Image (tube, rainbow, N blue to C red):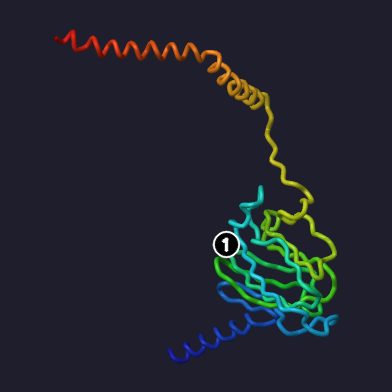
């Protein structure tokens, strides 16, 4: 009976693994690869023009150079030749989930026009794709909620691209800039004015009374010296 149960469990496990490796998707407990393509040429390509190795890192530490951003890739732009084969190493430097998605690819070769790498935490994946010959700029981003909005967005250009995408951190202006409003009430206004006045008055008061402060310090020092000289005579 135990042997039969073990056999059934092994069959179930093998069927699950097979299901994870279907329809252009590879998945395990660390991450997922969708629509990788290392050998099939797009219809408008007769041969691979170049092979490019790109390492792309994702994480919070890469957003520190951008004001108001929380997540980012370590690079925001790549440029390749038409019909280039790109070998991507995707590294997640965080303990949270991140994706690398490229949109706008030909649907006959990449289902839903998409290339997708995903890591559920710290780690790395490797996969390849072959770009069409069309001169175009492709969106590269993380599609998890608020990750792109918080900075995880880049662009991949083929043959220089057909322009720049908006809101690429450090490269292009945002469609809608982040605004950090202040609730200006009468109280906050009064506090601000008071702080400015105090900050201006303190140095001014010190400058005007510099001589007085010096005289006061001299008197204090002389008093201390007198106290030291009088003390031993009184005790004798």
The correct choice, above or below, for 127 with respect to 119 in the image is: below
Quadrant location of residue 133?
Answer: bottom right
Residue at 85% over, 70% down: 135
Residue 182 horizontal/vertical position (percent):
68, 35
Characterize the local packing of mark 1: few (<14), some (14-19) or many (20 or more) Cα atoms within 10 angstroms. few
Residue at 85% over, 80% down: 44
Look at the numbered disc 1 and give the secondary structure of its residue: loop
Q: Which residue is mark 1?
A: 96
- Residue closer to the observer: 214 or 138: 214
Q: Is residue 34 left or right of residue 212?
A: right
Residue 196 horizontal/vertical position (percent):
62, 24
Q: Residue furthest top?
A: 234
Residue at 46% over, 14% down: 213
Residue 225 horizontal/vertical position (percent):
30, 13
The correct choice, above or below, for 113 with respect to 16 in the image is: above
Quadrant location of residue 169?
Answer: bottom right
């Amino acid at each position: 009976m135990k042997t039969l149960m073990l056999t059934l469990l092994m069959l179930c496990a093998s069927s699950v693994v097979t299901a994870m490796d279907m329809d252009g998707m590879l998945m395990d407990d660390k991450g997922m690869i969708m629509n990788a393509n290392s050998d099939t040429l797009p219809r408008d390509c007769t041969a691979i023009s170049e092979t490019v190795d790109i390492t792309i890192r994702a994480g919070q530490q890469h957003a520190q150079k951008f004001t108001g951003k929380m997540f980012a890739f370590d690079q925001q732009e790549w440029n390749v030749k038409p019909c280039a084969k790109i070998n991507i190493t995707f590294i997640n430097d965080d303990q949270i989930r991140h994706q690398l998605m490229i949109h706008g690819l030909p649907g006959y070769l990449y289902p839903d026009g998409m290339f997708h790498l995903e890591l559920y935490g710290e780690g790395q994946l490797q996969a390849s794709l072959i770009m069409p010959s069309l001169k175009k700029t492709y969106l590269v981003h993380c599609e998890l909620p608020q990750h792109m909005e918080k900075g995880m967005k880049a662009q991949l250009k083929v043959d220089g691209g057909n322009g720049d995408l908006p809101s690429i951190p450090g490269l292009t202006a945002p469609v809608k800039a982040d605004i950090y409003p202040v609730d200006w009430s009468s109280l906050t206004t009064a506090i601000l004015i008071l702080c400015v006045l105090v900050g201006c008055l303190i140095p001014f008061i010190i400058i005007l009374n510099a001589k007085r402060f010096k005289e006061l310090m001299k008197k204090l020092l002389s008093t201390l010296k007198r106290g030291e000289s009088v003390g031993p005579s009184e005790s004798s």
